[in-house]
Amino acid sequence: MTLYNINGQQLHVHEEGSPTGKVALLIHGWGSSWYAVSPLLPLLRQRYRCLAVDLPGYCASPRGPERATMAGYADLLTTLIGEVTTQPVVLVGHSMGGMISLMIALKRPELVERMVLLCPTISGHLSLLINLTLFPFVVLERFPLTNVIVGVFEPLVGITDRLLRAPLFADRTDISNEDYERIKADTRRRDQGRIRAECFRAMRENDLRGKLGPIDIPSLVIWGLEDNTVPLRDASVVAREWPQADLRVIPNAGHWPQFETPEITGRYVRAFLSTPLKLLKVEF
């Protein structure tokens, strides 16, 4: 892990690939870490200098002094881009990381060469299943005492396994037990209850519907057909408002196609990144 100091904010970044290569900035989603995008690293590091961040408040990066917002995360990563390269970067964002990627593209399009978005949050409103099952725990985790109580009882009653597996993964998911346990561990970090609550609220306050049309950056958008976290209604927003984007929906995948269907996800990403930018812009 490399430690960056961005305007006083410590940011831990997992780096792979050539130090002199073009930068690919990988941004994880809610309740996660850099590991969320790790299946794409073997493919990307052949071509890019990969920077997979831990957003402030998540995993190894300490939280910031103010309440987390999508705009704040986007501004922080925009500054990081300016510190590591003078060339436009490739943005790879999963879930909430997709929303942050879109914020960067809207604010500073000159910094972005192309984007790969995996089940990106568009409206900020997660599925009914997530709201019925996880939202009460998000509220409880916001406060120190109730966060401790949830942390004590979680291993005893298996809150995570009971409530997370169905919304996050397809019925016949191919995710390995090892990867599932790592994702679950990131989701249930006991010291991150407050940041999860802040980001849950921040996503809802950052509805991007009606704002996608001006984006003219070549983009690949991948969705799992059985995504019960960021529902397919958000994919419909992409199809309706941003028809230039290359939208691909993958069967037998939920909210984590990079883990559940790594071969087909990798094939789409490889084809998109291998296409010369001039051709992508013509198609776009």
Image (tube, rainbow, N blue to C red):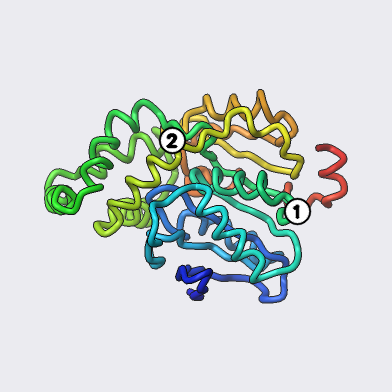
Number of the label disc, if any, that sits on residue 204 = 2
User: x%, y% of residue 179?
Assistant: 40, 55
Which amino acid type is marked by label 2? Answer: Arg
Q: Measured along the vertical axis of the image, is residue 160 above or below residue 20?
A: above
Picture residue at 86% right of the left edge, 45% below the top: 279
Q: How many marks?
A: 2
Q: Is residue 192 left or right of residue 119?
A: left
Q: Residue at x 51, y 75 (%)?
A: 2
Closer to us: 36 or 63: 63
Query: Against 264, is 236 above or below?
Result: above
* Residue plotted at (47% across, 68% down): 11
Where is residue 63 shown, x and y percent of the image? 38, 61
Element type at mark 2: helix
Q: CA distance from mark 2 to mark 1?
A: 27 Å
**Residue 267 can be seen in this image:** no
Residue beneath label 1, please?
Answer: 110
Q: Element at badge 1?
A: helix
Residue 85 shows in the view:
yes
- Would residue 115 appear left or right of 95 to someone viewing this image? right
Name the residue rendered at 64%, 71% in the picture.
83
